Image (cartoon, coloured by chain):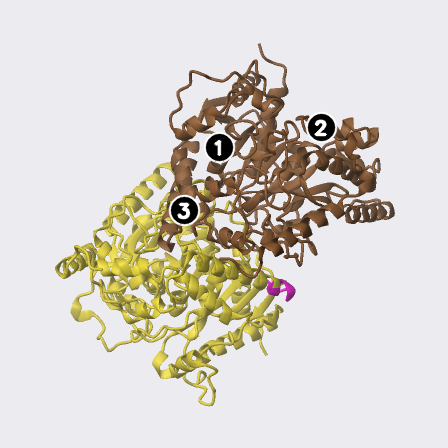
Chain colours: A yellow, B brown
Amino acid sequence: MLTAKTCKDTKQLIAVAQNVLAESIPVKYMVPAEMLPPKSQLDVHNFPAQSGLMSPKELQITETSSVDIVKAIANGEWTAEEVTVAFARRAVISHQVTNFATEFLISDALAHARDLDRTFKKTGRVVGPLHGLPISVKEHISMEGRITHGSYIAWIDKISSEDATLVKLLKKAGAVFHVRTNQPQSLMHLDCDNNIYGRTYNPFNRNLTSGGSSGGEGVSIGMKASPMGVGTDSGGSIRQPASCNGVYGFRPTTLRLPHGGTVMPGMGQESIRCVIGPLGQGVDDLELFMKSVLDQSPWDYDPSLVPVPWRSSMPSKNITVGVIWDDGIVRPHPPIQRALRETVAKLKAYGVKKVTFQPYKHDLAWKIISALYFPDGAAAQKDVLAEAGEMLLPLTEWAFGFSHGPLTIAENWHWNVQREKYRTEYHEVMKSKDVDVIICPAYVGVAPEHGTAHYWNYTSVWNLLDHPACVFPFGGVVDPKLDKPEFDYKPRNEQDNCEWKKYCPETFLGAPIGLQVVGKRYHDEEVLAATRVIESALRADNLG
Amino acid sequence: MLTAKTCKDTKQLIAVAQNVLAESIPVKYMVPAEMLPPKSQLDVHNFPAQSGLMSPKELQITETSSVDIVKAIANGEWTAEEVTVAFARRAVISHQVTNFATEFLISDALAHARDLDRTFKKTGRVVGPLHGLPISVKEHISMEGRITHGSYIAWIDKISSEDATLVKLLKKAGAVFHVRTNQPQSLMHLDCDNNIYGRTYNPFNRNLTSGGSSGGEGVSIGMKASPMGVGTDSGGSIRQPASCNGVYGFRPTTLRLPHGGTVMPGMGQESIRCVIGPLGQGVDDLELFMKSVLDQSPWDYDPSLVPVPWRSSMPSKNITVGVIWDDGIVRPHPPIQRALRETVAKLKAYGVKKVTFQPYKHDLAWKIISALYFPDGAAAQKDVLAEAGEMLLPLTEWAFGFSHGPLTIAENWHWNVQREKYRTEYHEVMKSKDVDVIICPAYVGVAPEHGTAHYWNYTSVWNLLDHPACVFPFGGVVDPKLDKPEFDYKPRNEQDNCEWKKYCPETFLGAPIGLQVVGKRYHDEEVLAATRVIESALRADNLG
């Protein structure tokens, strides 16, 4: 149903958003058009360093982890201002080659950074654990006085009256926000394209997607345009872009971090909750984020949250890692298989107990979660799209197609009961196998080609279960010599066939490889601790 | 829609349930019919003691709190068997004058008690913190191998395949189950009548209701037929019967205690969750219950639970108590007003800070929760009633009338959003007033006459907010001299008028007076600690 907004309004609205972006880019940080890499250059992830526009110190700063940045500022070694300038510069250059930003916040960020520097100079103390740390934020997370449209053209006239709760808490901890980032139409693609800004490109291979829906965040961290970022995840939207861009992403258990102020249609749907969480350059960064927020008792601002503080968990080799090699539905691509094999071998050499974990009814998981993603048949989303006469992108159609059609209340309840039953059974299976965490693919392969991210269930199964999950980079990229296609593989079903046919190593040159570590519900701390152990095993030179 | 079950089947089903009850009553414990008080005798609460059928030791045991019973057993002073016998005897006599039970479990209870005694004798140790403690359980909470019908005739053919999760945990802690208790049709009355067993009577005045929906539990604890009981609460169903029977009842925050195995139509409805919780003879008993369960990490059995252990909170006078004298919609009856006035005066004398707390939009609260009780228009309940061609009792019609009609998914979400907004605002109001707990009526008056419990919002507002709430006996009963009707009061609306007209002190002779203490969400421990403080103030002889 089209309402008052005509096509002309639509064009005007798009122009408004595009102008906000264009005018927010400081010209002095921009690379002149003639110095930009040619469109044919696929790998641009190192372009900020190669551009010659960043000083050695700026490169040093932007190649430092969040944990070390806040230390350097707290030591008085670096100022918040110079850190902000370094990341602002890198963010602008990164945007020019990937289109990852929706709005730069650089003058505000610099004013805030200078303010923090003054406070530090006066008191000798930092205001909080994130003092001076630049953080990028996915667009649909509200910022006071700014448009928050969630990639819906019709919502370009919506200006947030206050910061999202999480933004407030990060600010209180001392964070500086320098850039807002892109996301796909409907926020329900593992890809990043919309009718407002267009596509965000993968910096390691611009033929590939940045992932999604937090695709802008994936690029932001992947290009070191920001040391830390905030994304959201209902089906893999933090983890899959983290994997696509060779960085770390964490989907916490729901209701630990405050979700208030996140803008999307269908608020009040509680069968599957969207979760907010961090992306960063390492596990330490993810933990810094979680701890900085939870140490502020967010449940005292948002009574929907569970009052569970961050309980730092010491990494210990004395864990049992369950390995999911294949979910039984879609076979992971060769680079992912290789990463799993090598990781498991290194875990063994490192002395960590690992067992093959038979995935428990992941097909049923998909049946349940696909019913519960859009209990209203995606009417909430479709209405907002129709409001601006907006065309549905193919991956939007694809996601809405998950819907079982509008459900009745009784049907919605039926699927809620199935979800609870499945959660209890999965928990029992993990307990019965004595498995502390599961290691598994973060996606069927590396970053897929634009518009081809169809299979969600390597991440969405954990959304259904509400298990915390961390994606980390295995290290290295697709290697045609090692990652040969399995020509003789016989796909088990249509989905398997569809994903199998997509694999050809040459398509994915340069693409980083990610893996996923998953824990039991509310065992967020153990997931990060286990990821550290797995990384130590990978780095240890103890094979053979 | 009527199904295979015909009226004949219905009669047979009722007969099955009634026979189960009749055959479960040990004849040797029964009071001969001619010794029972006449029907015209309204106050029967002390009949077990007056019957002459209980020994002094049995009376002593049954007049002891749970905390002291488990101590006496752990000291070797009493055996679990003699404790069980004492409560079994008292329960049977109590049932004869109130009709509170649906099934006695005495032979199993005695076998279990003897087993516990043997273990104790052999090891010198108790099996858990509830070793040998008799506990009564509301019928719709599953017990393995027994019918669990939830007061629905159509479900009398349902036999539970396992114990409810909470029953399992209580058993692990050493509890002995001796009796299952009555509840109203649909489980949605603040009263206790159904088509299977009929009405449960208030032992203090049999013209009045036992309250509901955990009315059988209210009587069980009120007559000391059990030292502790398990009820459920979606709108006041633990607290109002506790108040009606002069005992303690606690509605914890949702998802702290496991709800699995509780039988009712409309499972999967998550907008307003039914909560399971204890009734007992004192705050210590309630805390013993909570701690005994939470110390077993129930979240490791039921992953829907929040992993928050019981954090014992020391009672401190250094709290601020907000007083709700009147919710602005329906004026509490004179005995409740008197109880509040006296409590507040004693709090002042005791040195506890108290402030008048302006109830925040309790009318809106009712609008939201009444929409969310039956998002399906009570179709789930009506279907089960229709299955056996069951007549709707007037209070069932009344409760179903709360429904705004069947909601669409979008409407359900709309009300979920309103609920979240209201929770956040209420939390802010409490914070802004520095109020730790609120003291307020537990019901508009004392136990109402049968079939007249119409106004829910003194308890249901806290269900909407998901705030923990404890009902405690103020002490004393309705006093016609002190609690005169307010003839000159001008009711503010139809509901107010309806409740005001019901008050006449002579109607409520002998009825105990209860009050309610409410805390912030998840502040369960503080609610019990504050109730102790309030009780200390009431007991302290420091006025004037």
Q: Position of residue A469 (x, y in %)?
A: 48, 62
Q: Is residue A474 left or right of residue B240?
A: left
Q: Which residue is mark 2?
A: B38
Tag in front: 1 or 3: 1
Task: Kindly report the distance in space between the C-alpha atoms of the residues bearing marks 1 and 3.
Answer: 52 Å
What mark, if any, has residue A74 been given in the picture?
3
Tag 3, which chain?
A
Badge 2 and badge 1 in a common chain: yes
> Residue A432 lies in what quarter of the image?
bottom right
Q: For the residue marked with disc 1, what is the amino acid? A: Tyr
Badge 3 and badge 2 in a common chain: no
Q: For the residue labelled by badge 2, is the local secondary structure a helix, a strand or a loop? A: loop
Q: Which residue is mark 1?
A: B458
Q: In this rendering, is residue A338 above or below A464?
A: below
Tag 2, which chain?
B
Q: For the residue labelled by badge 3, is the local secondary structure a helix, a strand or a loop? A: helix
Q: For the residue marked with disc 2, what is the amino acid? A: Pro
Near-viewer residue (A97 or A355): A355
Over which residues does the magenta segment extend?
A429-436
Task: Kindly report the distance in space between the C-alpha atoms of the residues bearing marks 2 and 1.
Answer: 35 Å
Q: Is residue A45 left or right of residue B42?
A: left
Q: Residue furthest top?
A: B544
> Residue A127 lies in what quarter of the image?
top left
